[in-house]
Image (cartoon, helix red, strand yellow):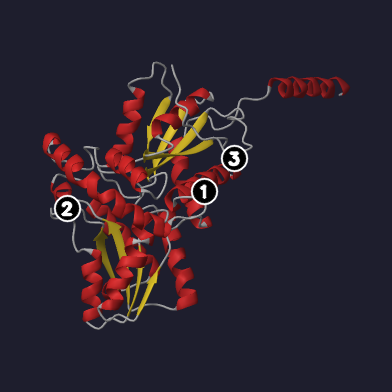
Amino acid sequence: MPFSTEPEFRHGESPAQGATTAVLYCNLGTPEAPTAPALRRYLAEFLSDQRVVEIPRPIWWLILHGIILRVRPKKSAAKYASIWTPEGSPLKVWTDKQSQLLGQALQARGHRVVTRYAMRYGSPSVASQLNALKEMGITRVLIVPAYPQYSATTTASVFDAVYTWAAKVRRLPELRFMNHYHDDAGYIAALAARVRAHWATHGQPEQLVRSFHGVPQRTLELGDPYHCECYKTARLLAEALGLAKDRYKVTFQSRFGKAKWLQPYTEPTLVAMAQAGVKRVDVMCPGFTGDCLETLEEINDEAREAFMHAGGETFHYIACLNDSPEWAQALASICEPHLSGWPTQAEPDAAALAQSRATALAVGATR
Protein backbone atom coordinates (compact mmCIF):
# COMPACT_ATOMS: atom_id res chain seq x y z
CA MET A 1 0.00 0.00 0.00
CA PRO A 2 1.49 3.41 -0.91
CA PHE A 3 2.07 5.84 1.91
CA SER A 4 1.60 9.58 1.79
CA THR A 5 4.64 11.84 1.99
CA GLU A 6 2.78 14.11 4.41
CA PRO A 7 3.36 12.45 7.84
CA GLU A 8 5.12 14.61 10.36
CA PHE A 9 7.65 13.14 12.79
CA ARG A 10 9.06 15.42 15.42
CA HIS A 11 12.77 16.15 15.28
CA GLY A 12 14.81 13.62 17.24
CA GLU A 13 11.85 11.31 17.88
CA SER A 14 12.42 7.62 17.40
CA PRO A 15 9.58 5.56 15.91
CA ALA A 16 6.98 4.04 18.24
CA GLN A 17 9.64 2.67 20.64
CA GLY A 18 7.76 -0.59 20.98
CA ALA A 19 4.31 0.91 21.46
CA THR A 20 1.43 -0.58 19.48
CA THR A 21 -1.28 1.89 20.55
CA ALA A 22 -1.69 5.49 19.40
CA VAL A 23 -3.89 8.51 20.01
CA LEU A 24 -4.66 10.71 17.00
CA TYR A 25 -5.74 14.17 18.15
CA CYS A 26 -7.73 15.82 15.34
CA ASN A 27 -8.50 19.49 14.85
CA LEU A 28 -10.32 21.38 12.11
CA GLY A 29 -7.44 22.69 10.05
CA THR A 30 -5.66 25.78 8.87
CA PRO A 31 -4.09 27.15 5.69
CA GLU A 32 -0.38 26.61 5.23
CA ALA A 33 0.28 30.34 4.89
CA PRO A 34 -1.62 33.63 5.27
CA THR A 35 -1.85 34.10 1.51
CA ALA A 36 -4.71 34.13 -0.95
CA PRO A 37 -3.55 31.00 -2.85
CA ALA A 38 -3.16 29.05 0.41
CA LEU A 39 -6.58 30.21 1.59
CA ARG A 40 -8.14 29.25 -1.71
CA ARG A 41 -6.83 25.67 -1.39
CA TYR A 42 -7.90 25.43 2.24
CA LEU A 43 -11.37 26.90 1.75
CA ALA A 44 -11.99 24.73 -1.32
CA GLU A 45 -11.39 21.60 0.78
CA PHE A 46 -13.22 22.87 3.86
CA LEU A 47 -16.30 24.23 2.13
CA SER A 48 -16.62 21.21 -0.16
CA ASP A 49 -17.35 18.97 2.82
CA GLN A 50 -21.04 18.03 2.77
CA ARG A 51 -20.98 17.85 6.57
CA VAL A 52 -20.12 21.55 6.66
CA VAL A 53 -22.41 22.83 3.91
CA GLU A 54 -25.61 20.84 3.35
CA ILE A 55 -26.82 22.76 0.31
CA PRO A 56 -27.47 20.55 -2.77
CA ARG A 57 -24.13 19.90 -4.48
CA PRO A 58 -24.79 21.40 -7.95
CA ILE A 59 -26.09 24.67 -6.47
CA TRP A 60 -23.33 24.92 -3.89
CA TRP A 61 -20.61 24.12 -6.45
CA LEU A 62 -21.67 27.15 -8.49
CA ILE A 63 -21.74 29.41 -5.41
CA LEU A 64 -18.43 28.13 -4.06
CA HIS A 65 -16.43 28.28 -7.28
CA GLY A 66 -18.28 31.12 -8.92
CA ILE A 67 -18.32 33.55 -5.98
CA ILE A 68 -16.75 32.49 -2.67
CA LEU A 69 -13.38 31.21 -3.89
CA ARG A 70 -13.02 34.28 -6.08
CA VAL A 71 -13.68 36.79 -3.28
CA ARG A 72 -13.09 35.33 0.16
CA PRO A 73 -9.45 34.04 0.01
CA LYS A 74 -7.93 37.53 -0.19
CA LYS A 75 -10.05 38.84 2.70
CA SER A 76 -9.40 35.77 4.84
CA ALA A 77 -5.67 35.90 4.10
CA ALA A 78 -5.48 39.40 5.56
CA LYS A 79 -7.21 38.20 8.73
CA TYR A 80 -4.87 35.23 9.07
CA ALA A 81 -1.87 37.50 8.54
CA SER A 82 -2.96 39.57 11.54
CA ILE A 83 -2.69 36.59 13.91
CA TRP A 84 0.10 34.55 12.25
CA THR A 85 3.08 33.73 14.47
CA PRO A 86 6.76 33.02 13.67
CA GLU A 87 5.94 29.33 14.27
CA GLY A 88 2.98 29.47 11.90
CA SER A 89 -0.77 29.24 12.37
CA PRO A 90 -1.75 29.47 16.08
CA LEU A 91 -4.24 26.62 15.70
CA LYS A 92 -1.56 24.32 14.31
CA VAL A 93 0.97 25.37 16.94
CA TRP A 94 -1.43 24.73 19.83
CA THR A 95 -2.77 21.47 18.40
CA ASP A 96 0.76 20.12 18.00
CA LYS A 97 1.69 21.28 21.50
CA GLN A 98 -1.41 19.71 23.03
CA SER A 99 -0.71 16.37 21.37
CA GLN A 100 2.81 16.44 22.83
CA LEU A 101 1.55 17.36 26.29
CA LEU A 102 -1.06 14.61 26.07
CA GLY A 103 1.65 12.08 25.28
CA GLN A 104 3.73 13.26 28.22
CA ALA A 105 0.75 13.11 30.58
CA LEU A 106 -0.18 9.59 29.48
CA GLN A 107 3.42 8.46 29.78
CA ALA A 108 3.60 9.86 33.31
CA ARG A 109 0.57 7.69 34.13
CA GLY A 110 2.31 4.57 32.93
CA HIS A 111 0.88 4.40 29.41
CA ARG A 112 3.14 3.78 26.47
CA VAL A 113 1.36 5.26 23.49
CA VAL A 114 2.24 7.29 20.44
CA THR A 115 0.43 10.62 20.13
CA ARG A 116 0.02 12.47 16.85
CA TYR A 117 -2.12 15.36 15.68
CA ALA A 118 -3.97 15.68 12.38
CA MET A 119 -6.06 18.27 10.59
CA ARG A 120 -9.40 17.49 9.02
CA TYR A 121 -8.62 20.03 6.31
CA GLY A 122 -5.07 20.87 5.35
CA SER A 123 -1.87 19.29 6.60
CA PRO A 124 -1.01 16.93 8.19
CA SER A 125 -4.12 15.17 6.98
CA VAL A 126 -5.92 12.43 8.88
CA ALA A 127 -5.05 9.92 6.17
CA SER A 128 -1.36 10.79 6.15
CA GLN A 129 -1.05 10.45 9.91
CA LEU A 130 -2.92 7.14 9.94
CA ASN A 131 -0.56 5.93 7.22
CA ALA A 132 2.41 7.02 9.30
CA LEU A 133 1.11 5.25 12.40
CA LYS A 134 0.45 2.07 10.45
CA GLU A 135 3.95 2.22 8.98
CA MET A 136 5.36 2.50 12.53
CA GLY A 137 3.68 -0.74 13.52
CA ILE A 138 0.72 0.76 15.39
CA THR A 139 -2.19 -1.69 15.55
CA ARG A 140 -4.68 0.29 17.68
CA VAL A 141 -5.70 3.94 17.24
CA LEU A 142 -7.94 6.12 19.40
CA ILE A 143 -9.40 9.04 17.41
CA VAL A 144 -9.82 12.10 19.66
CA PRO A 145 -11.43 15.20 18.12
CA ALA A 146 -10.28 18.52 19.57
CA TYR A 147 -13.95 19.51 19.78
CA PRO A 148 -15.44 19.11 23.29
CA GLN A 149 -19.00 19.48 21.98
CA TYR A 150 -20.20 17.00 19.35
CA SER A 151 -21.46 18.27 16.03
CA ALA A 152 -21.94 16.50 12.74
CA THR A 153 -20.19 19.48 11.11
CA THR A 154 -16.97 18.81 13.04
CA THR A 155 -16.77 15.55 14.99
CA ALA A 156 -18.61 13.44 12.45
CA SER A 157 -16.54 14.96 9.66
CA VAL A 158 -13.36 13.75 11.36
CA PHE A 159 -14.86 10.28 11.53
CA ASP A 160 -15.72 10.53 7.84
CA ALA A 161 -12.06 11.19 7.07
CA VAL A 162 -11.05 8.09 9.03
CA TYR A 163 -13.69 5.95 7.28
CA THR A 164 -12.58 7.22 3.87
CA TRP A 165 -8.99 6.25 4.65
CA ALA A 166 -10.08 2.89 6.05
CA ALA A 167 -12.04 2.04 2.89
CA LYS A 168 -8.76 1.95 0.96
CA VAL A 169 -6.70 -0.04 3.49
CA ARG A 170 -6.55 -3.83 3.41
CA ARG A 171 -5.18 -4.49 6.90
CA LEU A 172 -6.79 -2.06 9.29
CA PRO A 173 -5.73 -1.23 12.82
CA GLU A 174 -8.32 -1.44 15.57
CA LEU A 175 -10.10 1.90 15.77
CA ARG A 176 -11.96 3.67 18.56
CA PHE A 177 -13.68 7.04 18.39
CA MET A 178 -14.35 9.62 21.06
CA ASN A 179 -17.58 11.55 20.49
CA HIS A 180 -17.47 14.37 23.03
CA TYR A 181 -16.36 15.51 26.49
CA HIS A 182 -18.40 18.67 26.91
CA ASP A 183 -19.37 17.81 30.48
CA ASP A 184 -16.17 16.13 31.63
CA ALA A 185 -15.20 17.29 35.11
CA GLY A 186 -11.54 17.76 34.20
CA TYR A 187 -12.38 19.81 31.12
CA ILE A 188 -14.72 22.04 33.15
CA ALA A 189 -12.09 22.40 35.90
CA ALA A 190 -9.45 23.40 33.34
CA LEU A 191 -11.76 26.08 31.93
CA ALA A 192 -12.53 27.34 35.43
CA ALA A 193 -8.83 27.47 36.29
CA ARG A 194 -8.23 29.58 33.18
CA VAL A 195 -10.93 32.05 34.24
CA ARG A 196 -9.82 32.22 37.88
CA ALA A 197 -6.23 32.91 36.85
CA HIS A 198 -7.41 35.79 34.66
CA TRP A 199 -9.62 37.20 37.39
CA ALA A 200 -6.83 36.96 39.95
CA THR A 201 -4.91 39.48 37.84
CA HIS A 202 -7.67 41.64 36.37
CA GLY A 203 -10.61 41.30 38.74
CA GLN A 204 -14.11 40.17 37.75
CA PRO A 205 -16.27 41.68 34.98
CA GLU A 206 -19.89 42.70 35.01
CA GLN A 207 -20.59 39.92 32.53
CA LEU A 208 -18.78 36.77 31.41
CA VAL A 209 -19.66 35.92 27.81
CA ARG A 210 -19.06 32.36 26.58
CA SER A 211 -18.91 32.43 22.80
CA PHE A 212 -19.19 29.12 20.93
CA HIS A 213 -18.73 28.56 17.23
CA GLY A 214 -22.08 28.80 15.48
CA VAL A 215 -23.77 26.27 13.22
CA PRO A 216 -26.96 26.63 11.17
CA GLN A 217 -30.20 26.46 13.17
CA ARG A 218 -31.23 23.65 10.84
CA THR A 219 -28.65 21.32 12.41
CA LEU A 220 -30.42 21.59 15.77
CA GLU A 221 -33.78 20.89 14.18
CA LEU A 222 -32.32 17.78 12.52
CA GLY A 223 -31.13 16.40 15.86
CA ASP A 224 -27.55 17.63 16.23
CA PRO A 225 -26.76 17.79 20.00
CA TYR A 226 -24.23 20.62 19.66
CA HIS A 227 -26.53 23.42 20.89
CA CYS A 228 -27.50 21.51 24.04
CA GLU A 229 -23.93 20.47 24.78
CA CYS A 230 -22.70 24.07 24.52
CA TYR A 231 -25.31 25.17 27.04
CA LYS A 232 -24.42 22.31 29.38
CA THR A 233 -20.74 23.28 29.25
CA ALA A 234 -21.68 26.87 30.03
CA ARG A 235 -23.92 25.86 32.94
CA LEU A 236 -21.32 23.57 34.50
CA LEU A 237 -18.63 26.22 34.14
CA ALA A 238 -20.87 28.83 35.77
CA GLU A 239 -21.49 26.45 38.66
CA ALA A 240 -17.76 25.81 39.03
CA LEU A 241 -17.13 29.57 39.15
CA GLY A 242 -20.09 30.25 41.44
CA LEU A 243 -21.66 32.64 38.93
CA ALA A 244 -25.33 33.57 39.17
CA LYS A 245 -27.40 33.29 35.97
CA ASP A 246 -27.50 37.05 35.51
CA ARG A 247 -23.69 37.25 35.44
CA TYR A 248 -23.05 35.29 32.26
CA LYS A 249 -24.31 34.83 28.73
CA VAL A 250 -23.99 32.15 26.05
CA THR A 251 -23.59 33.30 22.44
CA PHE A 252 -22.63 31.89 19.05
CA GLN A 253 -20.14 33.36 16.59
CA SER A 254 -18.78 32.89 13.07
CA ARG A 255 -22.04 33.05 11.18
CA PHE A 256 -21.61 32.44 7.46
CA GLY A 257 -24.17 33.12 4.74
CA LYS A 258 -27.76 34.33 5.02
CA ALA A 259 -29.36 31.30 6.70
CA LYS A 260 -30.49 31.45 10.33
CA TRP A 261 -27.79 30.18 12.69
CA LEU A 262 -27.85 29.37 16.39
CA GLN A 263 -28.64 32.47 18.43
CA PRO A 264 -27.94 34.77 20.16
CA TYR A 265 -25.11 35.98 17.92
CA THR A 266 -21.97 37.08 19.74
CA GLU A 267 -21.16 40.48 18.28
CA PRO A 268 -24.75 41.87 18.29
CA THR A 269 -25.09 40.69 21.89
CA LEU A 270 -21.93 42.54 22.92
CA VAL A 271 -23.12 45.68 21.16
CA ALA A 272 -26.50 45.49 22.91
CA MET A 273 -24.79 45.02 26.27
CA ALA A 274 -22.62 48.09 25.75
CA GLN A 275 -25.62 50.15 24.66
CA ALA A 276 -27.47 48.99 27.79
CA GLY A 277 -24.71 50.36 30.01
CA VAL A 278 -22.43 47.37 30.60
CA LYS A 279 -18.93 48.80 30.88
CA ARG A 280 -16.77 45.70 31.21
CA VAL A 281 -17.10 42.23 29.73
CA ASP A 282 -14.84 39.20 29.71
CA VAL A 283 -15.20 36.90 26.72
CA MET A 284 -13.99 33.32 26.41
CA CYS A 285 -14.49 30.58 23.82
CA PRO A 286 -14.89 27.21 25.60
CA GLY A 287 -15.56 25.26 22.41
CA PHE A 288 -12.06 26.01 21.08
CA THR A 289 -9.31 24.13 22.91
CA GLY A 290 -6.63 26.27 21.25
CA ASP A 291 -6.56 29.87 20.11
CA CYS A 292 -7.10 30.40 16.39
CA LEU A 293 -8.51 32.84 13.84
CA GLU A 294 -12.00 32.68 15.35
CA THR A 295 -10.77 33.62 18.82
CA LEU A 296 -7.84 35.92 18.16
CA GLU A 297 -9.17 37.89 15.21
CA GLU A 298 -12.95 37.52 15.34
CA ILE A 299 -13.33 37.89 19.12
CA ASN A 300 -10.24 39.67 20.44
CA ASP A 301 -10.17 42.09 17.51
CA GLU A 302 -13.53 42.50 15.74
CA ALA A 303 -15.84 41.83 18.70
CA ARG A 304 -13.68 43.99 20.96
CA GLU A 305 -13.91 46.89 18.52
CA ALA A 306 -17.69 46.50 18.22
CA PHE A 307 -18.17 46.51 22.01
CA MET A 308 -15.95 49.54 22.57
CA HIS A 309 -17.49 51.46 19.67
CA ALA A 310 -20.96 50.86 21.15
CA GLY A 311 -20.00 52.44 24.48
CA GLY A 312 -18.21 49.70 26.37
CA GLU A 313 -15.10 50.66 28.30
CA THR A 314 -13.18 47.46 29.09
CA PHE A 315 -13.04 44.26 27.07
CA HIS A 316 -10.97 41.30 28.20
CA TYR A 317 -10.47 38.18 26.13
CA ILE A 318 -9.63 35.07 28.19
CA ALA A 319 -7.30 32.80 26.24
CA CYS A 320 -8.23 29.24 25.29
CA LEU A 321 -6.84 26.23 27.14
CA ASN A 322 -3.77 26.13 24.86
CA ASP A 323 -0.87 24.60 26.84
CA SER A 324 -2.62 24.76 30.22
CA PRO A 325 -1.25 22.01 32.54
CA GLU A 326 -4.78 21.45 33.83
CA TRP A 327 -5.97 20.80 30.28
CA ALA A 328 -3.15 18.36 29.51
CA GLN A 329 -4.05 16.33 32.59
CA ALA A 330 -7.77 16.54 31.83
CA LEU A 331 -7.25 15.35 28.26
CA ALA A 332 -5.20 12.40 29.52
CA SER A 333 -8.01 11.51 31.96
CA ILE A 334 -10.55 11.78 29.15
CA CYS A 335 -8.51 9.40 26.98
CA GLU A 336 -7.75 6.76 29.63
CA PRO A 337 -11.17 5.05 29.72
CA HIS A 338 -11.17 4.80 25.92
CA LEU A 339 -7.77 3.07 26.05
CA SER A 340 -9.05 0.49 28.53
CA GLY A 341 -8.32 -3.08 27.49
CA TRP A 342 -5.70 -2.09 24.96
CA PRO A 343 -2.05 -2.84 25.71
CA THR A 344 -0.46 0.50 26.47
CA GLN A 345 2.82 -1.01 27.57
CA ALA A 346 5.46 -1.98 25.02
CA GLU A 347 6.37 -5.60 24.52
CA PRO A 348 9.39 -6.48 26.69
CA ASP A 349 12.73 -6.21 24.97
CA ALA A 350 13.92 -9.75 24.15
CA ALA A 351 17.51 -9.21 25.38
CA ALA A 352 16.33 -7.55 28.58
CA LEU A 353 13.84 -10.36 29.17
CA ALA A 354 16.54 -13.00 28.68
CA GLN A 355 18.85 -11.16 31.08
CA SER A 356 16.04 -10.93 33.63
CA ARG A 357 15.41 -14.66 33.42
CA ALA A 358 19.11 -15.43 33.73
CA THR A 359 19.34 -13.23 36.80
CA ALA A 360 16.32 -14.92 38.34
CA LEU A 361 17.84 -18.37 37.74
CA ALA A 362 21.18 -17.29 39.21
CA VAL A 363 19.47 -15.93 42.32
CA GLY A 364 17.49 -19.15 42.66
CA ALA A 365 20.63 -21.26 42.42
CA THR A 366 22.32 -19.44 45.32
CA ARG A 367 19.41 -20.07 47.70
Asked whether the viewer can see residue 7, the reply is yes
Quadrant assignment for the N terminus: top left
| Mark closer to the observer (1, 3) | 1
Provide residue 294's location: percent of width, then percent of height: 34, 57
Choose the circle earlier in sequence order: 1 or 3: 1
SS of the residue at dot 3?
loop
Few, some or many residues within 10 Å of mark 2 (<14, 14–19, 20+): few
On the image, numbered disc 1 is attached to which residue?
Answer: 97
Quadrant assignment for the C terminus: top right
Depth check, front residue: 80 or 274: 80
Provide residue 17's location: percent of width, then percent of height: 62, 30
Residue at image coords 69%, 20%? 350
Q: Could you give the CA–CA distance between mark 3 and mark 2, rounded to whole angstroms?
A: 48 Å
Choose the circle earlier in sequence order: 1 or 2: 1
Residue at image coords 35%, 20%? 168
Name the mark on residue 257.
2
Question: What amino acid type should be assigned to the residue bearing mark 3?
Answer: Gly
| Mark closer to the observer (3, 2) | 2
Total numbered badges shown on the rendered structure: 3
Outermost residue, right direction?
366
Provide residue 47's location: percent of width, then percent of height: 25, 42
SS of the residue at dot 1?
helix
Relative vertical location of residue 236 with respect to residue 180 in this rendering, above or below: below
Few, some or many residues within 10 Å of mark 1 (<14, 14–19, 20+): some
Question: What amino acid type should be assigned to the residue bearing mark 2?
Answer: Gly
On the image, numbered disc 3 is attached to which residue?
Answer: 110
Choose the circle earlier in sequence order: 3 or 2: 3
82 lies left or right of 249: right
Provide residue 311's location: percent of width, then percent of height: 27, 81
| Mark closer to the observer (1, 2) | 2
320 lies left or right of 167: right
Relative vertical location of residue 75 with respect to residue 124 in this rendering, above or below: below
